[in-house]
Amino acid sequence: MMRYIQYGPPGLALILWLSRFVIRDDGVGVVNGLVVFLIVWWLVIFTMLPIGVRSQEEAGEVQEGSEPGAPVAPMLMKKAWWTTIITSCIWIVYYIVTDSGLAAQYMPTDGSWG
């Protein structure tokens, strides 16, 4: 336990340094960035769940009293890691587009789209 305490101050310094990129008055804020990340993460995880899954019936290993369509090895941790990586890439693109003002130039400023 004591050896993990040594990572506390550098970790806190890294978090504070990174926070200056997300805590601001304009662009992507902390709450906005977190909400977008979580929504995209759930969308990606639900699209990744059926990838590479074999049912017990397909594998020929149906356990007594279980559903034959239940997965043999769902690989949820592997899919969660890949989901986090993919979502991080998508979020970085979102951050760049939002922070650069590319999206803002197409938004209405006087209350009308015309």
Image: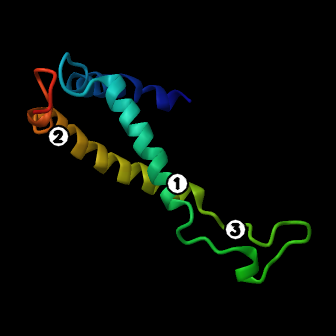
Q: Amino acid at mark 1?
A: Phe
Residue drawn 36% across and 54% down?
A: 86
Q: CA distance from mark 3 to mark 1?
A: 15 Å
- Return the residue at label 3: 71
Residue 23 falls left or right of residue 34: left
Along the viewing direction, whichever of 26 and 108 lies nearer the viewer: 108
- SS category of the residue bearing label 1: helix
User: CB atoms at circles 2 and 1 under 8 Å apart?
Assistant: no
Residue drawn 38% across and 38% down?
A: 37
The spot of residue 20 in percent (x, y) is 21, 22
- SS category of the residue bearing label 3: loop
Residue drawn 70% across and 70% down?
A: 72
Q: Which mark is residue 96?
A: 2
Q: Which mark is residue 46?
A: 1
User: CB atoms at circles 3 and 2 under 8 Å apart?
Assistant: no
Lower sequence index among marks 3 and 1: 1
